[in-house]
Image: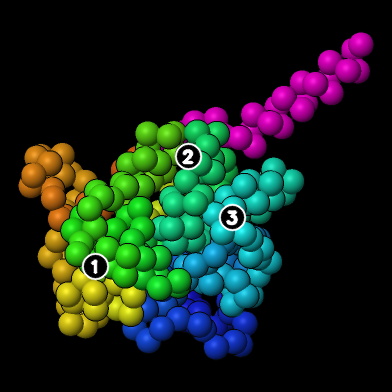
Amino acid sequence: MAEAFSSRRYMRDLKLPFCPGCGLFSLGDTFLRAVHELGHKDLNGFCFTSGIGCSSWIPSPYFLADSVHTLHGRSIPVATSIKLVRPDLNVVVFGGDGDIVGIGLSHFVHAARRNTDILVIMGNNMVYGMTGGQVAPTTPFNTKTTTTPYGSFEHPLDAARLAVAAGAAYSARWTTAHLNELKESVKTALQMPGFKFIEVVTHCPTAYGRRAGFKDIGEMLKYYRENAVSTQQAERMSEEELEGKIVVGEFVKRERSTLVETVYAMMKEAKASDTQD
């Protein structure tokens, strides 16, 4: 009989820092469920990096694993360095939308371009949640935030599609109303090489929901379910029809040579060349 899942098996005995009702509880738990179902009895084969923000607190210091809590937006280059030195590890980045595609955007793009062998999981609560609910690169158009009290006047960045365009091996988007799909997506990503990106649209009742007009968490999750369309459906819809929708599913899954492969191959070639000289 398979051993029952318990997130506490993979976590330190510390009180979590999230607001009541935060979707990041579900995100962290779902990740650990995926790890459990892949047969990992602990996190010894993992290393986590994170920047600054609510989502960055998921692994550090709470996961019972090696982790590096980095500067704002700098978790991806730190993860890249770790993977190059220790290619045997599963290197996973957790971060928020501001951390990953705001201040950390160029690192995100270049890691996808290089096809760096890491998994980046972005908790997208659509605002800068930890610092006061300011407008973020992912805030939906015309949404009220603390810095856009009359509504956001910018259209949001589509991080999942940007990852595809930049060269990612895998890119997917789910919401906290799609936890089974998210779990399977994490399992897929952990078992393939290259740069993997999973965006998770997560409910934030404290900094986002109340200003955006949601009464409670249930209403936010209902909105996610009712306004989610699959990548297959989205292909048949116009831009006008997609306005306000959340496109979920896998955007790309492909094989490309990875950064670790190319760097180590070049090192081997250089060493052979030096020996011949």
Q: Mark 2 falls on what kind of element?
A: helix
Q: Give the Cα distance between marks 3 and 1.
A: 31 Å
Q: Residue furthest top?
A: 277
* Labels 2, 1: front one: 1
Observer-nearest of 58 and 243 = 243
Q: Is residue 276 magenta?
A: yes
Choose top left, top right, bottom left or bottom right for residue 165: top left
What is the x, y in percent for residue 86?
72, 49
Observer-nearest of 143 and 109 = 143
Crowding near pointer 1: few (<14 within 10 Å), some, many (20+)? few
Q: Earlier in the sequence, mark 3 or mark 1?
A: 3
Mark 3, residue position? 75
Examine the rendered structure and indicate whether residue 136 appears above or below residue 64. above
Q: Earlier in the sequence, mark 3 or mark 2?
A: 3
**Is there any visible trace of residue 253 in the rendered image?**
no
Q: Main secondary structure of the magenta part?
A: helix
Whether residue 65 sits left or right of residue 30 in the image: it is right
* Labels 3, 1: front one: 1
For badge 3, the amino acid type reads: Ser
Q: Mark 3 falls on what kind of element?
A: helix
Mark 2, residue position? 109
Mark 1, residue position? 149
For badge 2, the amino acid type reads: Val
For badge 1, the amino acid type reads: Pro
The magenta segment: 253-277
Crowding near pointer 2: few (<14 within 10 Å), some, many (20+)? many
Examine the rendered structure and indicate whether residue 262 appears above or below residue 225. above
Q: Residue visible at 15% across and 55% down?
A: 244
Q: Earlier in the sequence, mark 2 or mark 1?
A: 2
Q: Are discs 3 and 2 less than 8 Å apart at CB?
A: no
Observer-nearest of 94 and 87 = 94
The structure's colour scheme is: rainbow
